[in-house]
């Protein structure tokens, strides 16, 4: 794929750089060294990183997605550093407690345009993560290239579109429009990032579920109908096609898992086989093309198989967890923190307090408070709650 001068332009002007690194390589380095990426090591992937139930965090998931993305980029002719940058960014905006925390903050922010992890990612890389500033002093975040920012955008519309997923809040529309200059649909790099994310968590969440005993392999054949029903309920899809995907994938699973070295090796072979299967099918179906023409093609059977694996994680992990008191407690922690910081904004970190003090109205102040809370890790959210609210919910 070809990249022009517009693709490497940055949101805020910068002086000349050494020619030792290209602009997309520099983008990748900025994200790798960001505090937002480091914080993902203590943020929930499916279950909390402090528990023994699941072994992956948002950070390890992100690194795996980046590796998958680089492989796919190589096959379809996209810039590998650019795709890796998008993959490294893809979860930066997620708040404490994963999607449970995202729903809680969306409820709090309903009157000011909502909260969405992808929109928060855009806000973080273009405003909140301190690196560069505009000539007038406004923060420009990591100041990534236009192509890199656009590669993080999966939902090219704003909160006012009335959709559950969106990619920018009203006060970030200027940088969104800058990133999407002359764009027609999703760029190829954003499509690669999105697919790599789907492949990563569909395969690895099942692996973790097996290791932690949530999925008992010799019982999988008996859970056929339950898995299909849960998958359709959570994600949609065609039940008959999902059933066919189940029948195709079931013979690939080991018959049992005991935790032995041999069984762990077999499980790793399974995850490698799944990833290779998906990447091969996609690369064979996706001809190399321009960034906004053609795109990444996922064959229908492969899409069904990825969805089926996601449904296995839903059936045995995510759906049962939704019924546990922990989920309610986590939301309460975030609600309490919003109230506490509204009453005592001086408790905010300096980098979030500064824009709060410049805010012209209550809506802008609330957005700054939500920015602060979204930046917390699972553990720091609980620690802040203990300090500011005078108690720590023991169920966490």
Image (cartoon, rainbow, N blue to C red):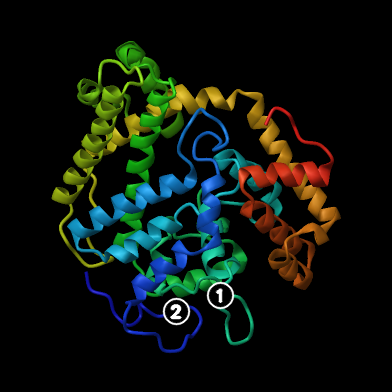
Label 1 residue SS: loop
Residue assigned mark 1: 140
| CA gap, disc 1 and disc 2 | 9 Å
Q: Is residue 51 above or below residue 334?
A: above
Q: Earlier in the sequence, mark 1 or mark 2?
A: 2
Confirm or deny contact between disc 1 and disc 2 (CB under 8 A).
yes
Q: Is residue 333 above or below residue 219?
A: below
Using the image, tell me which numbered label, if any, was put on residue 10.
2
Residue 357 versus residue 17: which sits nearer the camera?
17
Label 2 residue SS: loop
Residue 339 versus residue 285: which sits nearer the camera?
339
Which residue is painted at 22% across and 67% down in the image? 290
- Residue 163 seen in this snapshot: no
Number of numbered discs: 2
Using the image, tell me which numbered label, if any, was put on residue 97.
none
Percent of width and height locating residue 48: 56, 36
Which residue is painted at 41% across and 70% down in the image? 27
Give the quarter of the figure containing the N terminus.
Answer: bottom left
- Determine which quarter of the picture holds residue 308: top left
Which residue is painted at 52% across and 29% down in the image? 52
Percent of width and height locating residue 371: 66, 58
């Amino acid at each position: 794929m070809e990249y022009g001068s517009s693709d490497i332009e940055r949101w805020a002007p910068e002086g000349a750089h050494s020619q030792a690194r290209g602009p997309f390589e520099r983008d990748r380095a900025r994200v790798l060294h960001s505090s937002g990426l480091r914080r993902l090591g203590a943020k929930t992937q499916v279950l909390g990183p402090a528990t023994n139930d699941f072994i992956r965090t948002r950070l390890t998931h992100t690194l795996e997605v980046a590796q998958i993305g680089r492989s796919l980029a190589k096959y379809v002719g996209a810039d590998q550093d650019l795709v890796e940058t998008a993959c490294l960014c893809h979860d930066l905006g997620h708040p404490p407690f994963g999607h449970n925390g995202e729903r809680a903050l969306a409820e709090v922010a309903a009157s000011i345009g909502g909260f969405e992890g992808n929109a928060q990612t855009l806000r973080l890389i273009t405003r909140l993560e301190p690196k560069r500033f505009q000539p007038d002093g406004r923060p420009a975040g990591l100041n990534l290239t236009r192509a890199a920012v656009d590669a993080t955008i999966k939902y090219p519309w704003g909160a006012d579109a009335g959709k559950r997923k969106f990619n920018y809040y009203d006060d970030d529309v200027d940088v969104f429009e800058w990133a999407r200059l002359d764009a027609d649909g999703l760029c190829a790099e954003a499509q690669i990032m999105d697919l790599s994310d789907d492949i990563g968590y569909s395969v690895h969440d099942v692996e973790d579920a097996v290791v932690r005993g949530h999925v008992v392999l010799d019982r999988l054949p008996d859970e056929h109908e339950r898995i299909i029903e849960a998958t359709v309920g959570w994600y949609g899809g065609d039940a008959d096609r999902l059933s066919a995907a189940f029948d195709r994938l079931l013979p690939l699973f080991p018959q049992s898992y005991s935790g032995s070295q041999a069984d762990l090796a077999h499980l790793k072979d399974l995850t490698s086989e799944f990833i290779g299967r998906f990447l091969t099918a996609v690369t064979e179906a996706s001809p190399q093309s321009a960034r906004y023409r053609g795109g990444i093609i996922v064959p229908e059977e492969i899409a069904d198989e990825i969805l089926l694996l996601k449904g296995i994680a839903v059936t045995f992990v995510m759906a049962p967890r939704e019924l546990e008191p922990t989920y309610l407690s986590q939301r309460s922690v975030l609600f309490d923190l919003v109230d506490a910081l509204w009453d005592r904004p001086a408790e905010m970190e300096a980098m979030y307090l500064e824009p709060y003090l410049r805010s012209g109205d209550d809506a802008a102040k609330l957005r700054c408070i939500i920015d602060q809370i979204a930046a917390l890790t699972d553990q720091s959210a609980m620690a802040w709650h203990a300090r500011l609210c005078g108690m720590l919910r023991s169920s966490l």
